[in-house]
Amino acid sequence: MGSGNGGFGQNPNGVGDRDGVIIVDHGSRRTESNLMLNEFVSMFKERTGYPIVEPAHMELAEPSIHVAFNSCVLQGANRVIVSPFFLLPGRHWNQDIPSLTAEAAKEHPGVSYLVTAPLGLHPLLVDVLNDRINHCLSHIAGDAEECSVCVGTNKCQLH
């Protein structure tokens, strides 16, 4: 069982010390977008206490799933959990991510892996979306600063 998970995964079958977690997004040509995944992965790792957590981009940017998988193994993972940072299931979740993960795993025959479901229709996403809406409304009313996603983009404004 894992050493510390910040209250997450109180499940005997949960993430352990020899598990690597890869959080994979689509990837972007925009550096700022790719850096947001790094920030999210840092937040995730700190909050969960999971010892091995790596970011990956499916395409367009590094690190790739292959690079992240290798990094997990180098840190001692004997099982890699690939978690798509995608809202809904589609071709990338159904075909591309499993294929790229299988290719990366070929170099590590003693390491098992799985690809989890995307975020999907999780009840907490209702709270996240509602928070985002209310923050933007507060911003246009002059009661809040732009959020970290919108800062400097002039996207959060009433037209």
Image (cartoon, grey):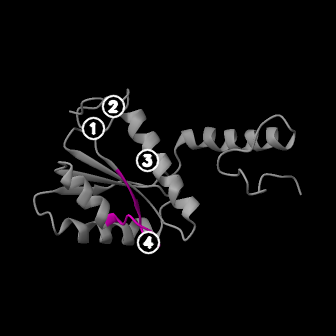
Hey, what amino acid is under mark 3?
Val
Q: Nearer the viewer, residue 14 or 71?
A: 71
* Magenta residue span: 54-65
Q: Which mark is residue 5?
A: 2
Q: Which quadrant holds residue 142?
A: top right
Q: Residue 155 location, x and y as percent?
A: 77, 57
**Image depth: mark 2 or mark 3 in front:** 3
Residue at numbered disc 1: 14
Residue 93 relative to residue 149: left or right? left
**Residue at coordinates 65% horizontally, 51% vertically from top-left?**
149
Hey, what amino acid is under mark 4?
Glu
- Of callouts 3 and 4, which one flags the residue occurring earlier in the amino acid sequence? 3
SS type, badge 2: loop
Per the model, the C-alpha gap separating discs 2 and 1 is 10 Å
Q: Is residue 55 above or below residue 48?
A: below
Hey, what amino acid is under mark 1?
Gly
Label 2–label 1 contact, CB within 8 A? yes
Q: Nearer the viewer, residue 32 or 104?
A: 32
- Of callouts 1 and 4, which one flags the residue occurring earlier in the amino acid sequence? 1
Q: Nearer the viewer, residue 150 or 125?
A: 150
**Residue at coordinates 33% horizontally, 31% vertically from top-left?**
5
Q: Residue 47 location, x and y as percent?
A: 42, 33
- Residue extending farthest to the left is 110
Residue 119 relative to residue 106: left or right? right
Q: Residue 73 location, x and y as percent?
A: 20, 54
Residue at numbered disc 3: 41
- Of callouts 3 and 1, which one flags the residue occurring earlier in the amino acid sequence? 1
Residue at numbered disc 4: 59
Q: Which mark is residue 110?
A: none
Q: Is residue 129 above or below residue 49?
A: below
